[in-house]
């Protein structure tokens, strides 16, 4: 079967660092995406990893370990506007669909 | 360059009616994906289309649901004889080619409420 697990909710303080983990079990692997989704809005692309290692983009970084079926999204210098759901998504090899996790709701408090 | 446009943003239908959801992909994008999102849940893949072709409909319910992406005009997701369980947000995404390392751009979604 195909399964993507991520925590349901996390809370962090403004200015801090937070790490959102994602583990996956899919039939093949052709890349992992992270999306941000504010309530009632469209998901927006944050990052894409296909090789092991860390990809850094401003305040956001994403890490992938294919052997462990594991990824994390790291958010630095948290801002109130970072309060949103963060969706981990995996594209399985040989198929056309991207499988999404249920998302992690991040609450940033002052 | 306009983004992915979905309409209507909100749609209310009575049980048994038909719902038609429209998606105009970004200019230059010929690949369209439809997803359904229930409250507090992730996006569930429904169907992947290219112009005039359904490529992967493995996420579509076998009955009442259909999708098309004609040569001209928007992609349409059609739900016949809607039931309360169809109430959800339906998102469309587009990409210029098959979504390998290409990000898909999402529309604002259509929120369907069945009463």
Image: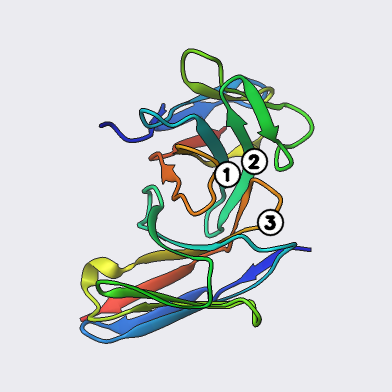
To the question of a shared chain for discs 2 and 3, the answer is no
Corner quadrant of residue B86: top right
Along the line of sight, the residue nearer the viewer: B38 or B26:
B26
Identify the image quadrant of the C terminus of chain B.
Answer: top right
Secondary structure beneath label 1: strand
Q: Which residue does the image show at 56% across and 16% down from the upper left?
A: B70
Secondary structure beneath label 3: loop
Q: Horizontal and vertical percent for residue A21?
A: 51, 79
Q: Which mark is residue B46?
A: 2
Q: Which residue does the image show at 67% across and 22% down from the upper left?
A: B80
Identify the image quadrant of the N terminus of chain B.
Answer: top left
To the question of a shared chain for discs 1 and 3, the answer is no
Q: Horizontal and vertical percent for residue B97?
A: 50, 38
Measure the alpha-carbon separation of dots 2 and 1. Answer: 7 Å
Name the outermost residue toward the front: A51
Q: Which mark is residue B36?
A: 1
B82 versus B93 height, above or below: above
Secondary structure beneath label 2: strand
């Amino acid at each position: 079967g195909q399964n993507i697990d991520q925590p349901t909710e996390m809370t962090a303080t403004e200015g801090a660092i937070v790490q959102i983990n994602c583990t996956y079990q899919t039939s093949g692997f052709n890349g992992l995406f992270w999306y941000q989704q504010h309530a009632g809005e469209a998901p927006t692309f944050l990052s894409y990893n296909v090789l092991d290692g860390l990809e850094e983009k401003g305040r956001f970084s994403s890490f992938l370990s294919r052997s462990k079926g594991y990824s994390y999204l790291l958010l630095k210098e948290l801002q109130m506007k970072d309060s949103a759901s963060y969706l981990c998504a995996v594209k399985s090899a040989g198929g056309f669909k991207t499988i999404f996790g249920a998302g992690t709701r991040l609450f940033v408090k002052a | 360059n306009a983004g992915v446009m979905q309409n209507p943003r909100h749609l209310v239908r009575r049980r048994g009616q038909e719902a038609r959801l429209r998606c105009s992909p970004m200019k230059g994008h010929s690949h369209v994906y439809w997803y359904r999102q229930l409250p507090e849940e992730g996006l569930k893949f429904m169907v992947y289309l290219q112009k005039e072709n359904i490529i992967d409909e493995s996420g579509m319910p076998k009955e009442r649901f259909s999708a098309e992406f004609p040569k001209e005009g928007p992609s349409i997701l059609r739900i016949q004889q809607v039931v309360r369980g169809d109430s959800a947000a339906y998102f469309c995404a587009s990409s210029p080619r098959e979504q390998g390392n290409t990000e898909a751009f999402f529309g604002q979604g259509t929120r369907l409420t069945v009463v």
